[in-house]
Amino acid sequence: MVHSFRPAIAMMALFTLLLGLAYPLAVTGIAQLVFPSQANGSLVRDAGGRVVGSALIGQPFAGATYLHPRPSAAGDGYDAAASSGSNMGPLNPNLAARVAESAQTIRAEDGPGVIPADAVTTSASGLDPDVSPAYARLQAARIARARGVPVQQVQTIIDGQTQGALLGFVGQPRVNVLLTNRALDARFGAEG
């Protein structure tokens, strides 16, 4: 009876080695050769080489001198270990209250103007690193005031950090919050 299981055991061992070891090592090696930055998490480093974040994961910025990210439902704000959306439906009174509170805060900080949806809603992961160009432009006057520079200079940095849709048609234009804030610090000096 053991003889009849030998071919099956040998095939299981072969597939385990191929799919459990060889394939992951090959894919990892190719990724490291072709896309080393992305394969290592798209880490952003300061001038001294210290990691300050990832271009793929949102993080909080609250100071008036910085571009603010969209709200996060991930734990205590941008907690990758608690990544998830709020799962609140559009008729949920808690969601309506949170959106109204966020809109009130934005009006107080950034003044009048149309508030884009991403300014008051969380992403599915709660870790979205990007905001819409409309939300970034809404914040330009506050950032310029807080930094004591002309609003056009801040707008130029935001425009320079705006990325179009992938391949021209996949997704929406976006502005990476971390990279934009680093560009603001590089141009006008670090704040705080």
Image (tube, helix red, strand yellow):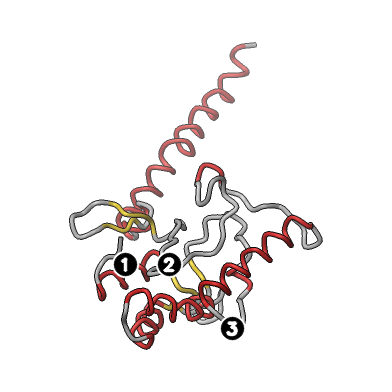
Residue 12 on image: x %, y %? 54, 28
Q: Secondary structure at mark 3?
A: loop
Rendered residue at 62%/18% (across/down): 4
Q: Secondary structure at mark 1?
A: helix
Of the pair 10 and 38, the residue shown nearer to us: 38
**What is the distance, in whole Å, between disc 3 and disc 2 at their CAs?**
20 Å
Q: Secondary structure at mark 2?
A: helix
Q: Amino acid at mark 1?
A: Arg
Q: Amino acid at mark 3?
A: Gly
The correct choice, above or below, for 85 with respect to 82 in the image is below
Is residue 16 visible in the rendered structure shown here?
yes
Is tag 3's residue or tag 1's residue first in the polypeptide sequence?
Answer: 3
Q: Amino acid at mark 2?
A: Val
Is residue 165 visible in the rendered structure shown here?
no
The residue indicated by pointer 1 is 182
| Residue 168: image tag | none
Of the pair 69 and 27, the residue shown nearer to us: 69
The correct choice, above or below, for 5 with respect to 87 in the image is above
For the N terminus, the image quarter is: top right
Q: Is residue 43 left or right of residue 85?
A: left
The 10 Å Cα crowd at callout 2, few under 14, some 14 to 19, many 20 or more, is many
Q: Residue furthest top?
A: 1
The residue indicated by pointer 3 is 113
